[in-house]
Image: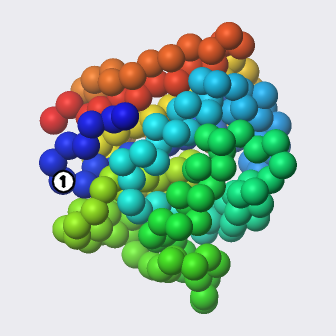
Amino acid sequence: MTEQTDGRRVVANISLSLDGHYAAPDNPHDMSWVLPYAVTDVGRDHLTRLWETATTALLGRVNAEGFLGFWPTVIGMEGADPRDEAFAKWLVDTEKVVLSSTLDSPPWERTTIVDRPAPEVVADLRAREGGDILVPSSASVIKALLAADAVDRLMLMIFPVFLGGGPRLFDDGLPAGRWALAHQAAGEHGELSLTYDRAR
C-alpha cells in the first residue's frame, strides 16, 4: 500500500497512447484502444493503487456522467474482477466533486457540483481533513491542475498503441519541474504502469 504523506495529495491518473494522446482523434469517447490493457493484472493493480489512500474523487462533467453509466454496474456483476469491483464500490461510496457549469443536480449520491476553476477547488479541498484527492481520467481537470503546478502524484498507464493524433495531456508552457519515479510495472502485452511524485 502507498504511504500517505502529510496533507492531502492531489493524485491525477490517465491512460496515454505511446505517441502521447489520451483520446483518439476521430472519436474521443472510443475506449477500444484502452480496454485490452486495462483488464490485465498490471492495469487492474494500477487501478487499485489509485484509490487506496484517496477519500475524494474530483471529476469533470463528461467523466462523471460516463463513470456513472459504467462503474455502478460492475458491483455484483457475475465474473467481475475483485479489483474492478473494489474500485467501483469506492467510487460509489466516496465523496465526489464534479466541476461543471451546466449540471443542475448531482448525477450521483455523495456528489457536489462546483462551477469554479479546478485549482481553487483543490485549494479548498486541501484545507479540509481527508485522504488523497483523486482525479481519475478527467483530462480537462488534470490539464488545469498541471498548469497550476497543483498535482502531487501523476499515475500513468502507457499502452503500446499509436493513435496517430488526438488531444495531448502535456501542453507546451507547463511549469518546469522535476518528478521522481515512485512505482513502475510492465505487463506482458507491453503496457506500463508508472507513478511519479512531484519533487518540490
Task: Give the mark count.
Answer: 1
Q: Is the residue marked by circle 1 packed among few (<14), some (14-19), or many (20+) residues within 10 Å?
A: few
Which residue lies at the image location 64% right of the left edge and 78% below the top edge?
107
Q: Position of residue 139 (x, y in %)?
A: 55, 50
Q: Quadrant of the N terminus?
A: top left
Q: Amino acid at mark 1?
A: Gly
176 vs 87, nearest the viewer: 87
Which residue lies at the image location 56% right of the left edge and 14% below the top edge?
186
Report the side of 135 relative to 200 (left or right): right
Residue placed under numbered mark 1 in the picture: 7
Q: Position of residue 104 (x, y in %)?
A: 60, 89
Q: Is residue 102 above or below residue 22?
A: below
Quadrant housing residue 22: top right
Quadrant housing residue 188: top right
Which residue lies at the image location 47% right of the left edge and 53% below the top edge?
135
Report the side of 136 relative to 88 (left or right): left
Q: Quadrant of the C terminus?
A: top left
